């Protein structure tokens, strides 16, 4: 019994494998951009579920780049939050006084205001004035714990990242192996 090998199919299969190798960085970049978008969705979900609002600006400021950078052995996509105070929400901060005033239910930050609010914990200190009267004032104490939204969103998507990558790679391999045969 003789086995017959169809050289035409073998040549096509070899060409398909070369095409996969050539196009693979492009597919990795697509997968990285998809992971960045998944990060944004997860960060917004955490922010919504836990009602972490300094303002809606914080939630809307999560972003992911539209393109990935492919270099030798690495694919990188930028993710982050544009809000200038996002680092304080992420990592926490010391309690402090913020100058400003309330307009309805919204606090308006105003550096020239003599009044304001204390963000975080405080204690009331009593001081006796020269005229003998007691003067009470709030003094910031302690810290405000960080919410770690960025870190938790990254950890959450990493849990299932391998399965998504393997599924996508298998899809590309199947697509190319059928091409032209």
Image: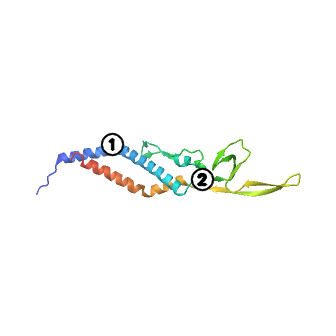
Label pair 1/2, CB-CB below 8 angstroms: no
Q: Nearer the viewer, residue 175 or 5?
A: 175
Residue 165 lies left or right of residue 52; in this view the side is: left
Residue 14 position in % (x across, y down): 25, 46
Q: CA distance from mark 1 to mark 2?
A: 42 Å
Q: How many marks?
A: 2
**Among the two numbered marks 1 and 2 on one chain, the one whose residue lies closer to the N terminus:** 1
Q: Nearer the viewer, residue 164 or 135?
A: 135
Q: Residue furthest front?
A: 104
Q: Which residue is mark 1?
A: 22
Q: Give the mark toward the camera: 1 or 2.
A: 2
- Left or right of residue 167, residue 137 in this image: right
**Residue 150 spot, x, y in % from top left:** 53, 52
Label 2 sits on a secondary structure element that is: helix
Pointer 2: what residue? Answer: 91
**Residue situated in front as seen by the camera: 97 or 32:** 97
Closest to the observer, 67 or 10: 67
**Quadrant containing the N terminus in the rendered view:** bottom left
Residue 134 in which image quadrant: bottom right
Reply above or below: 149 against 11. Answer: below
Residue placed at 44% from the left, 51% from the top?
Answer: 38
Mark 2: few/some/many CA within 10 Å (<14, 14-19, 20+): some
Q: Is residue 19 above or below residue 164?
A: above
Q: Position of residue 106 (x, y in %)?
A: 63, 48
Residue lying at 60% horizontally and 47% vertically, measured from the top left:
85
Q: Which mark is residue 52?
A: none
Check the image and report above or below for 65 versus 135.
above
Crowding near the residue tagged with mark 1, few <14, some 14–19, many ≥20 C-alpha atoms within 10 Å: few
* Snapshot colouring: rainbow
Quadrant in the picture for residue 158 = bottom left
Name the secondary structure under disc 1: helix
**Residue extending farthest right:** 131
């Amino acid at each position: 019994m003789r086995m017959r090998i169809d050289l035409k199919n073998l040549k096509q299969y070899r060409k398909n494998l070369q095409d996969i190798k050539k196009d693979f960085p492009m597919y990795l970049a697509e997968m990285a951009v998809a992971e960045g978008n998944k990060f944004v969705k997860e960060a917004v979900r955490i922010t919504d579920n836990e009602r972490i609002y300094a303002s809606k600006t914080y939630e809307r400021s999560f972003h992911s780049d539209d393109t990935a950078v492919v270099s030798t052995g690495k694919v990188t996509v930028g993710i982050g939050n544009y809000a200038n105070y996002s680092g304080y929400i992420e990592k926490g901060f010391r309690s402090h006084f913020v100058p400003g005033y309330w307009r309805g239910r919204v606090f308006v930050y105003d550096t020239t205001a003599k009044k304001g609010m204390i963000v975080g914990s405080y204690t009331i200190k009593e001081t006796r004035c020269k005229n003998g009267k007691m003067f009470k004032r709030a003094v910031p104490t302690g810290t405000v714990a960080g919410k770690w939204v960025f870190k938790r969103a990254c950890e959450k998507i990493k849990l299932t990242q391998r399965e998504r990558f393997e599924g996508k790679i298998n899809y590309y391999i199947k697509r190319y192996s059928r091409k032209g045969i």
